[in-house]
Amino acid sequence: MIFNKEINCSASVAFWNYWDQEHLEHIHDGYEKFQIIYEDKDLIFSVREVILPLIRLKITTPIFMKQLDKNNLIAFGIIFGVLSETKVFINDIGHDKCSIKVIYKFYLNGWKKLLRPLLKYLTKKWFQKVWEEDFVLKTRRQKVLKYNFKDFVGLPKKINDRINNDEYILKLPLARPKNSLAPLIKIKREDIEFKN
């Protein structure tokens, strides 16, 4: 399934939204608990409790997300024992405006092919719901960045300093507050590499 959208925010702000784990429980009705297992400069592995739309079934799913380059990311999850792949392509199409293309793919074999109509239906509902919930968050962040807002600092005290026309540059991993709602299990890269 392919979805194409445009929004009044930069590509970097749109990508920030995908990487911001803090907003999930507060903005999206479908997310409950989650835990980050591993995070690096361009990837994150987490486990999330998700409530599927309409059928209101709660499932736990691992999510692996990787930034492939400046304009693309890929995510993998498992729903009903089915591997899902989500590709996201985000491109600037003007000042503070971008296009977003999302491609969902489910790897179905055997009896799992019977889930195709249900997954197609749920994916369409899920995408629209998440898009609407995130829309204000993305456009509002774009606006406050123009006022020279800095994460965990806020707006400059002087009104004259509240003008910023610089391009927002996404830096991963995102900084999180000390009392983060996204608990991180600290695993060092060398702990996950295979050694002879």
Image (cartoon, grey):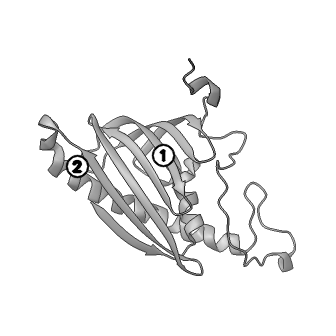
Q: Position of residue 166 (x, y in %)?
A: 73, 75
Say which residue label 2 marks: 119
Q: Position of residue 179 (x, y in %)?
A: 69, 39
Say which residue label 1 marks: 65
Is 112 rendered above or below residue 93? above
Of the image marks 1 and 2, the number of the one nearer the N terminus: 1
Q: Residue furthest front?
A: 196
Label 1 vs label 2: CA separation?
20 Å
In front: 184, or 50? 184
Which amino acid type is marked by label 1? Met
The structure residue drawn at horizontal position 37% and vertical position 52%, both measured from the top left corner, is: 86
Q: Position of residue 46 (x, y in %)?
A: 50, 37
Q: Is residue 98 left or right of residue 104?
A: right
Task: Label 2: state its secondary structure.
Answer: helix
- Label 2 crowding class (10 Å Cα cut-off): few <14, some 14-19, many 20+? some
The structure residue drawn at horizontal position 56% and vertical position 17%, both measured from the top left corner, is: 196
